[in-house]
Each structure stands twice: as structure tokens, then as C-alpha cells.
Amino acid sequence: MDVDAFVLTHRPTWDRLEVLVKNRRRLTGAELDELVDLYQRVSTHLSVLRSSSTDAGLLGRLSSLVARSRSAVTGAHAPLTSEIVRFATVSFPVVAYRAWRWWLGTAAAFLAVSVIVACWVAGNPDVQAAIGTPAELDQLVNHEFAAYYSDHPAGAFALQVWTNNARIAASLIAFAVFLGLPIPAVLLLNAANVGVGLGLMFHAGRGAFMLGLLAPHGLLELTAVFLAGAVGMRLGWTVIAPGDRPRGQVLAEQGRAVVTVAAGLVVVLAVAGLLEAMVTPSPLPTWLRIGIGAVAEAAFLAYVVHFGRKAVAAEETGDIADAPDFVPTR
């Protein structure tokens, strides 16, 4: 298709729609009908150009015009409840589902490092001596670890845990600004810290006790952290390898996907915080506490797979409807 000829032919239509949108509060009935008709036509023009042109300025202008026209045509935003339902059943799960390879790879690398470090610490007295004196290690494995979960009121502790976890997830997502390069280092550092704790506890014969405290909340908590790291790194990779579409368009889509995941993880980490504050230190049998954590983890993964797969089948991306793909530049 000759893009220049296409633009020359349809530019008067775009200019007319621009005028109608700017004066939408003073339009006559006939002009409102014209606005609806032009909105539909220009939406088609945008779809055609997205597959034929890489002109960021042109696509940016039309994307913005279509978005503003849609707002003028609909007259109001969708009810808040419907927006929340769409977010919960489409936007968040489809973004998480589409990132499953990055998500799974992040989890595998984290767990591998944790296990390697745990085995190294547990089997190496010199490493243990470098971590602390025998008295300090005894205090850590026999008192401080368990006391961490029970020394504070459950409500206050849940808020503290949620705030800390949200901060970690937010920092991982924020590192996408730096092409995701710091994210692996942050995750590996945390994996090493987990491995050190596991190694010390297993060496002292209290490994099962530690896992019994970590599993009820840690399964869901780590899953959320892995997802945050995965979408952050995926966004960074988009800059390096955007595929066969314009880099600006792909980057815009992935950037909005990151924001979607960040909002969803606020809820997920809140649930993990409640589990850590109320289930982990509870007097329930270990098998039951672990079972509660496993059920929460399975429910979250089933939710993502069920709704994410349905959204993918419906060709949903979780992106904002009529969102502009480019920022026009001069």
C-alpha cells in the first residue's frame, strides 16, 4: 500500500474528526451522527496503518484521535465495577499468563541458587564460621527465626510484611527502566540469603521446622516476586529485541502490562502477608499450615491459567482499549 497516498486521501477526514472532537459539547444532532461515523472510519484507517506504516508521528496522532473520539462517542467511562471485573478476569491474568516462560525461568533460577547455597553452607564449617560465632548461630537457629513470626501483633505484622513485600516487587518492576539489568542481581541476592538460612537450619537439624514456617506464606509470596521480576525483565528485553513490530509500539504495550501486574500484585502480596501473620505462627499442625499455603498457591496459579488462557483465546492482550502506541515527536 502507498502510505503517502493513503494519508493524502484521508487526511481531510481526520482533520474533520479533530474539529468535531474539540467542539463535542456544542454539536448538533447531525454533527453527532457525523462524529460517530467518522470515529468508525478513522478507527479502520488506524488499523490499516498499523500494519503498513512505521511512522511514529502519524500512528501516534491517529491513536490519540481515536481514543479521544471514542471517549466523545461513549460519553462516559464504563462503570467502576465493570472495570474492576475486567481487570480481575482479563487484564491481570492474561498479562501474567503471557509471561509464563519468563516467570517459570525466574522461579527455576531462584530456587536453583537457593538450593546450591544451602548445600554449600550446610556442608562447610568454614562458611558457617564466617557467618557468625557458634553462640550467634545457635541464637539464630533456635530462637530468632521462630520469634520473627510471633513477636508482633498479627495485624501490625501483616501490614509490615505486606509493605515490605510490595516494596520488593515494586523495586523489581521499577528496574525495568534500566532494561531490567539489575533485576537478576536483586533476585540472586535474595536467593542467596534464603539459601544461607536454609543451610544453617538444615545443619542444625531444624530444616523441616524452617520449611514448615516458610511454606504457608512463602509459596504465594515468592510466586508474586517471581512474576514481578519476570515482567520487569521482559520489558527490558523488549527494548533489545522488539520483534517484527516497531519498538515504540511493543514497548508501550509491555510498559502498560507492567503497570497492570504491579496493581494485581498489591492484592496477591496482601494475601501472602495475611498468611504470614496469621497462619505461619498459629498453633495449627504443620501439615495443615503448609496445606493452607499450598491451597492458596494452587488457587492463584489456577486463576491465572483459567482466565489467562480464556483471554488469550479471545485475542486479548490486557492492554488499554484504543491506547496510543506512540508518542508523536517533532
Image (cartoon, rainbow, N blue to C red):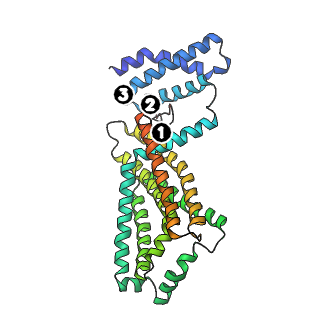
- Say left or right for 67 vs 50: right
Q: Amino acid at mark 1?
A: Gly
In the picture of the structure, the residue carrying the numbered disc 2 is 57
- Give the x, y percent position of residue 230: 41, 53
Residue 292 visible in the displayed image: yes
Residue at x 57%, y 74% (from the top left corner): 148
> What whole-number distance in Å separates the C-alpha atoms at marks 3 and 1?
20 Å
Nearer the observer: mark 3 or 1; the answer is 1
**Helix, strand or loop at mark 2:** helix
Q: Nearer the viewer, residue 151 or 128?
A: 151
Sequence-first tag of 2 and 1: 2
Residue at x 41%, y 16% (from the top left corner): 8
Mark 2 nearby-residue class (10 Å; few <14, some 14–19, many ≥20) = some
- Say left or right for 27 vs 203: right
Sequence-first tag of 3 and 1: 3
In the picture of the structure, the residue carrying the numbered disc 1 is 318
